[in-house]
Image (tube, coloured by chain):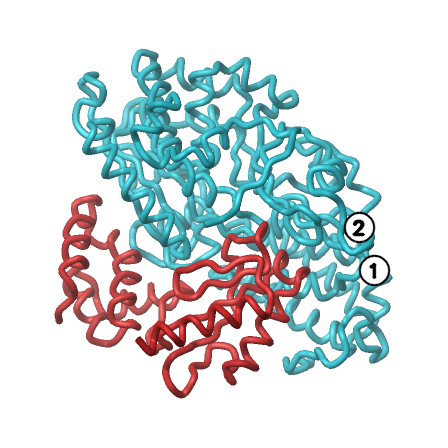
Chain colours: A red, B cyan
Amino acid sequence: MKFSEEFEARFAEMLAHYPTKRSALVPTLLYAQDEVGFLSDEVILELAARLDLTELEVRNVISYYSMLTTKPRGKFNVQVCTNISCLVVGGEDILRHCAKKLGVGNKETTPDGLFTLEEVECIGACSWAPAAQVNYDFHENLTTEKIDKVLDECRQKAAQ
Amino acid sequence: MASLVSHPDEVKVVSRRFGLGATNLDRYLELDGYKAVQKALGMEPDAIINEVKNSGLRGRGGAGFSTGMKWSFVPKQSAKPKYVLCNGDESEPGTCKDRLIFEHDPHSVIEGVMIAALAVGARSGYIYIRGEYRYLSIIMQKAIREAYAKGVIGKNIFGSGRDLDIYWHGGAGAYEVGEESALMESLEGKRGIPRIRPPFPAVVGLWGGPTVINNAETLACVPHIILGGAEWFAKLGTPKNGGTRLFCLSGNVAKPGVYELPMGYNLKKMVYEVGGGIPNGRALKAVVPGGASCPCLTADEVDVGMDFDSVAKAGSMLGSGGVVVVDDQQCIVKFALRTMKFYKHESCGWCIPCREGTDWLEKTLTRFHRGGGVMKDIDNMQYLSENMLGRTFCPLGDAAAMPTIAFVKKFRKEFEDHLDGRPCPYEKEGAAEELPVMAH
């Protein structure tokens, strides 16, 4: 299967960093997921072959890491933190608001394929809580108005 | 980008280059960057280790073990290559300090890894950054590339004849990987299941070679110690607790933020003066002093110096520096439940006391919070937690049990207020959760 040139360059460079090929697996899976949207059967078989691993060994690793998924997600993965620092300043209100606005529950995707909502564990934004990540972008000191704006901007971006 | 704060009581050591553009290598050099490693190149490895030992630097990841001591456990001779591994898998709820170091001063981490490598005789170092911190991985990769381009790392560093390679590595979402043996498993491309110890990583670590593993903040302290001297660093803190600490103030506090304060700084002062106190006219209920795994301190217990030994004496832990402030409108049962939900999610299931313990505690707390609890549950939660302590491969089991014991012991009345089908006295109307009520 074909990945981008950027992926291939990074992959080749990473392999040279370790005494074993397998060591490149975790970051490579994440980069592959970023390109394809999820870890499809095709991606899994390809990376297993490249790193001299069995399909099962790769799947075994995928199931351990919470950011890795074998199911397609929306274009924008809205990850709202409700862990302790966010909890005491209204993280759950942000999550509930997103669920209502998007009309989906935890780990569900909107029918148009734009948004997936996910309640996540601490993302390291505790001093700027409540916080969320949309894909890799941090959004902090959130209010319901602020997250509305973030979601609206995602919609606009998708429409372009 | 995370915003910066400041307070007159701050002593800026690790954070002294924050906001000064030090991600750029030239700027870092202007700000005394890579001077410490050049000094270290002229020192005997044992002299470096002794300097770090004498500085009183203790692990900033949470365990608080003497860094110099840890380095001294690495054997001088080894048939296998030795490694330095920087732990930037910052995931302890309440902790967001390594993020600022990577964002504002990535070269200080690289320099810390280099000095550690010189001290233990390693030729390669890895900087592991959690997967969620993608923008920081980009900053770190750029910093490493720049350092190679300018000959700071790579072959014959600073004309010393020594070669030293530094690599970035990324995670993909796992709290447990912050435990050092699980971190090595993850770097080797496996599930982050902890290894049995001994042997300790200093003897058998990455790919079987002796490995030093330190938290990013710990390593970022090292260049400052080499340049400023052990005595200077030690004196910043309290006896046996050298230096400063990046404290991540969060929760119900007027001015949350990451503040660099001397070791031993009074917690009450931190909450009321540095953090500006509790907003909205509310009162303090509890403080989690060092990340979610640390037993909470009640409002009466916060007059304590924030160093490893003083907080331990007060019955908790300094941990990772994540200070979570909880006001009197928060429900401790719910807080305990959210804490346990986290540990249940993160437990790898490798050992039974952790896998089963976190699951049952989460179920019991869920039911309890929704008014379905009975009196004996309160003692059961404590009993169950106490039986997890010390019975797991890695500290995740302890991390789940310790705060739970404190919540139950210190806030028993609040647990009792949830009995007999009464709704949670703190829950907003109409905000009842749709979680199923679990039965035994």
Tell me the number on the disc at residue B284. Answer: 2
Residue B67 is left or right of residue A9, and the answer is right
What's the residue at 33%, 24% (across, down)?
Answer: B29
Q: What residue does disc 1 label? A: B412
Identify which amino acid the numbered label 1 is placed on: Arg
B419 in relation to B436, above or below: above
Three-letter amino acid code of the residue under disc 2: Leu
Does residue A1 appear to the left or right of A33 in the view shown?
left
Q: Are marks 2 and 1 in contact (CB under 8 Å)?
A: no
Going 33% across and 63% down the picture, which residue do you hit? A61
Residue B80 figure quarter: top left
> Would residue B212 be visible to someone looking at this image?
no
Picture quadrant of residue B159: top left
Mark-to-mark CA distance, 2 and 1: 17 Å
Q: Nearer the viewer, residue B215 or B259?
A: B259
Q: Of marks 2 and 1, which one's residue comes earlier in the chain?
A: 2
| Vertical placement of residue B88 versus B339, above or below | above
Crowding near the residue tagged with mark 1, few <14, some 14–19, many ≥20 C-alpha atoms within 10 Å:
some
Residue under mark 1: which chain is it in? B
Callout 2: few (<14), some (14-19), or many (20+) C-alpha neighbours within 10 Å? many
Examine the rendering and report whether any part of residue B123 can be seen: yes
